[in-house]
Image (spheres, helix red, strand yellow):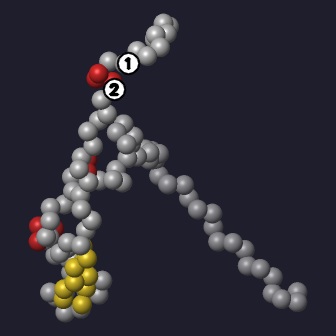
Amino acid sequence: MTRRPQGAQPPAETRAAPSAPEPLPAPELTEAECRRCGTYIAGLDGRYACGVCGWVNDHSEGHRRLPRADEDPDRPAHGRRRPRLLPGPLPELPGPLPEPPPPGA
């Protein structure tokens, strides 16, 4: 391996930092009435789900576009994947625990 001379710069393509996408603005908390049961509900950017009756409005009714996968700050780093599931059936759980002896026995 050859050492780089002091003060030498790596090639430009390795120096340039990858351009990160512009962060999206924070979502806005919005409120409305459920279209099915009338319950007062809150959502983000005009997207709602009612916890009482289960009604959900369509994602296209929101006030802003949804972020793409590459704009998601919680997305795993490039090259990282979710762990693979083991093949085969799930292991069986042990049977019920034995009953404790009655008090005073």
Question: Disc 1 marks which amino acid?
Answer: Gln
Residue 89's spot in the image, x, y percent?
Answer: 47, 52
Q: Is residue 3 left or right of residue 49?
A: right
How dense is the environment of label 2, judged by Cα within 10 Å: few (below 14), some, or many (20 and up)?
A: few
Q: Which residue is mark 2?
A: 15
Residue 69 makes an appearance in the image: no
From the top left corner, tell me how far across and down residue 61 is, in percent.
Answer: 11, 71
Q: Which residue is mark 1?
A: 9
Residue in view at x 83 percent, y 89 percent: 103
Q: Residue 21: x and y, percent?
A: 24, 46
Residue 93 locus on image (x, y percent):
58, 62
Q: Residue furthest right?
A: 105
**94 or 72, nearer to the observer:** 72
Q: Residue at x 17, y 75 (%)?
A: 46
Quadrant the C terminus occupies: bottom right
Between 100 and 72, the one nearer to me in the picture: 72
**44 relative to 82, above or below:** below
Q: Nearer the viewer, mark 2 or mark 1?
A: 1
